[in-house]
Amino acid sequence: MRAEIQAERALLGAVLTDPAGNDDVLRFVSPDDFLRPWHGQVLAAMRRLRARGVAPGPRAVYAELRNDPDLPQAAARDAVPLAA
């Protein structure tokens, strides 16, 4: 696996496991910064949640992604990419 992809996964995992402690990440990193589009979509979901005052933990992010009209139905209904 490429180092860039590993770094993206680590960054998203850090926010998912400690949403409050990694709040700065959501301000300084944008979805366009990611190499893998799916990772950008996860970050965008995290940012939408934070804008509504919701901590972007795993359950909240998954629920947000399920309701994302920009995601194909197969991706929006599948927790495997988020869990990975």
Image (cartoon, helix red, strand yellow):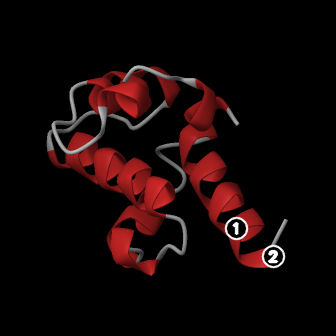
Q: Quadrant of the N terminus?
A: bottom right
Q: Answer yes or no: do the residues labelled 1 and 2 have beta carbons within 8 Å?
A: yes
Q: Residue at position x 54%, y 65% from top? A: 36
| Mark 2 burial class by Cα count in 10 Å: few <14, some 14-19, many 20+ | few
Residue at far right of view = 1
Give the numbered dot on residue 3.
2
Give x and y (percent) for residue 26: 38, 63
Q: Residue at position x 70%, y 37% from top? A: 84
* Front residue (pair 52, 38): 38
Asked if residue 1 is positioned above or below residue 60 in the image, the reply reads below
Asked if residue 14 is positioned above or below residue 78 in the image, the reply reads below
Q: Residue at position x 58%, y 42% from top? A: 18
Asked if residue 24 is positioned above or below residue 73 in the image, the reply reads below
Compute the Cα span from label 1 to label 2: 5 Å
Give x and y (percent) for residue 9: 67, 56
Q: What kind of element bears circle 2?
A: helix
Q: What kind of element bears circle 1?
A: helix
Does residue 64 appear to the left or right of 43 in the view shown?
A: left
Q: How many marks?
A: 2
| Mark 1 burial class by Cα count in 10 Å: few <14, some 14-19, many 20+ | some
* Front residue (pair 10, 28): 10
Asked if residue 62 is positioned above or below residue 44 in the image, the reply reads above
Amino acid type assigned to the residue bearing label 1 in the image: Ile
Residue 72 lies in quadrant: top left
Does residue 43 appear to the left or right of 6 in the view shown?
A: left
Amino acid type assigned to the residue bearing label 2 in the image: Ala
Give x and y (percent) for residue 11: 62, 61
Q: Residue at position x 21%, y 47% from top? A: 48
Give x and y (percent) for residue 5: 70, 67
Q: Which residue is mark 1?
A: 5
